[in-house]
Image (cartoon, rainbow, N blue to C red):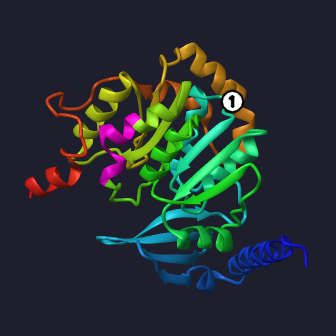
Amino acid sequence: MVPWASDAAASTVMHERFIAGLVALLLCGLTGTALAADRQVLHKEQSLYHTIMIVSEPSRVCMQFSVRDGSRNQSCINPRHPKRMVFGYTRMMMAALLLAPEPQAVLVAGLGGGTLPTALAELVSDVRIDVVEIDQAVVDAAREFFDFKETERMRVHIRDARVFAKRALQRGRQYDLIILDAYSGDYIPEHLMTAEFLEEVRGLLTPDGVVAANTFATSRLYGYESATYRSVFGEFFNFKLRTSNNRVILATNGPLPTQAELHANARAWRKALAPYDVPIASYPRRLSTKLDWDLSKRPLTDQYSPANLLQRSR
């Protein structure tokens, strides 16, 4: 057997399982209300970092992580429309293309079901994507249940994002776009929120590179986190919608684009993003540079960390 034959066979099996799961969901939707209301756990696993569940719902399959108040969806796919982005925050993250319209090198921290890197690989020809995910079990679940595939252009690295960033800096790696999505619904690892980490992220960006961070629309750390990004990147775009509990921070290694540039990029991407249900044309006017936080808050650092602050506020 040639060396890659077993990998190809495994990929085929995982793809067949994915298709079978989608067909099963479609059949459930056609057999009546009682079946459609069912919620089935397809997979449950305790990894080193989470309790991971794959849950079949009437119109979607979701990956859930355990959090303090139960379980929360991390990634979902609609079997009738596999490309369509289910979550608002995922669609919001695609606003990064308004600032980096043709990224050739992308780093994604946090995989989930692989929605964002998969979409970017489909949308941008010849893009090279490094995905950093600390939990092998998440990668395995994304492959089996969300049809996530690695390719020559998209590689997964099982590593802590901070460790990966430090080593990438040493090797002189640079990225046009860095997506920070290590967000579990109520938690972001504190060492990925500090000024020191963001300085490392900035060091990995090309001169006009962009970072897009998925984070909290409201939290006790909102002001501190905002101050931290501003201390490293200067002025940044705050992207919030009334329909989402998330905000997306968009910062650059250079000057922010003008409204005219944002609208031009939105027009260029509107048709391609339509199958993903991303209303990109409405995003430019939503990007704000307003300082909407308590300016007395100081930046987070490795010594002045989120854990310290939250413990003190109890």
Check the image and report above or below for 190 versus 25.
above
Residue at x 48%, y 71% (from the top left corner): 64
The location of residue 139, given as percent across then percent down, is 59, 67
Check the image and report above or below for 180 versus 72.
above
Q: Which residues are magenta?
A: 190-199
**Dot 1 corresponds to which residue?**
102
Left or right: where 67 falls relative to 4: left
Residue 88 can be seen in this image? yes
| 257 part of magenta stretch | no
Residue 38 can be seen in this image? no
In what quadrant of the picture does the C terminus appear? bottom left
Left or right: where 212 falls relative to 21: left
Q: Nearer the viewer, residue 204 or 90?
A: 204
The location of residue 84, given as percent across then percent down, is 67, 53
Residue at x 49%, y 82% (from the top left corner): 45
Residue at x 58%, y 21% (from the top left corner): 262
Task: Name the image quarter holding residue 23.
Answer: bottom right
The location of residue 185, given as percent across then percent down, is 38, 59
Left or right: where 13 falls relative to 143: right
